[in-house]
Image (cartoon, grey):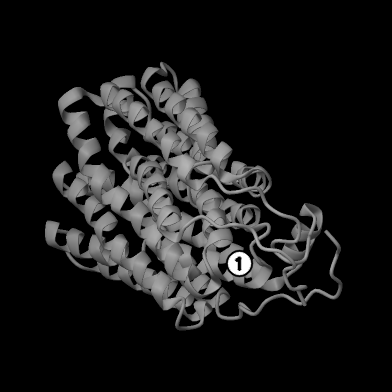
Amino acid sequence: MNAPATTTTPRLSMFQVLLCGALVVTTSMGIRHGFGLWLQPITMERGWTREAFSFAIAIQNLSWGLAGPLAGMLADRWGAFRVLLIGALCYALGLLGMASASNAALFTAMAGVLTGVAQAGTTYAVVYGVIGRNIDASRRSWAMGVTAAAGSFGQFLMVPVENWLIGHLGWQNALYVLAAAVLAIAPLAFGLREPPLQAGAHGRHQSIGSALREAFGYRSFQLLMAGYFVCGFQVVFIGVHMPSYLKDHGLSPQVATYALALIGLFNVFGTYTAGSLGQRMPKRYLLSGIYALRSVAIVVFLSVPLSPLSVYVFAAVIGFLWLSTVPPTNAVLAQIFGVQHMSMLGGFVFLSHQIGSFLGVWLGGKLYDATGSYDIVWWLAVALGVMAALVNLPVRETAIERREAVPA
């Protein structure tokens, strides 16, 4: 088993970590949740297909996922502060590039690659590492739920703001405003600047290579990655393509805006509830229930007549389940493997999420262009939700046993 800690590291206050972490996630996630609002204005003005825009956002999600383990590794080693500063700068440059890109390839590089890398350094994996190292295990799942709820509030707050900016300033000027706004992450990063890590502060010292071999060889880690793949597929497909889906069926753009805002609002309650329940019940059952309920919600949504009311009810339900997988998944990682390499391991699990995101957003555009309908992808999301509900049931939540303690 893990050797007991021999020294302690001074911790940041819980209030400071939660406040600064929540505001960072609110800003970063709030901006990216509204990207679906740019699909139609950009493709119509540039003369691009929906697949071209969808591919760029798919690359964004994939870049975010691929850069996540590296960002987490750097945050574990050098501190979240530096990673957040670089991420904020890249985010601003990516948004400026989205506004000025004159062809689909350049748009993909800016909106896809650069913005995706920036999100890896300004969202959950990095912030959750600080939470794991500074907040006791008895309150860790709850604290992660608070931070995830903040990201959801960002969606509720920012989506109407972004829609207003597009309508009153034009889609390019709206991106310029957001590029300036995202730089607010830089001063917030100072509140997450941790004291230097003392040797032995987290007990057993473990190299990066050993941590990776241990995690990828552990069945529960593989199952968590499989479930997170489905999470990414579902939420990014819905977030990016639902506005166009509703417009195709004759509903006004305001319905889509209100729906995305409702998703963000109810996700505040859903993520907080999931984080709180994760302290009281097995997290594998919580995750399984979330994925199963998502599939049920989609089936009901597709089965009833489409109307503003049905959209709002679906948005509220799916919003409650939207990112509620995030706190229990990350809390399980800390519970099994400890917090020394938490940001890095969380980054690898999130990579699986982003591969699912890539497929969800890209297939949405690809199959729409091929068939004129989103139906195939909707039902694929249902089937994957059932699969995710099943694969989370066997997850073991107990701390992994290690035969030897490696001296620091």
The x, y position of residue 325, in whole percent, is: 45, 66
What residue type is disc 1 on?
Leu
Q: In the rendered view, would you say 82 is above or below 317?
A: above
Give the position of the C terminus as an image quadrant: bottom right
Residue located at (17% from left, 34% from top) = 164
Q: Is residue 4 visible?
A: yes
The residue where tag 1 is placed is: 333
343 or 190, which lies in front?
190
The x, y position of residue 55, in whole percent, is: 47, 36
Q: In the rendered view, would you say 14 is above or below 125?
A: below
Residue located at (45% from left, 63% from top) = 144
Residue located at (44% from left, 18% from top) = 103
Which quadrant of the structure image shows residue 270? bottom left
Q: Is residue 374 visible?
A: no
234 or 166, which lies in front?
166
Q: In the rendered view, would you say 207 is above or below 93?
A: below
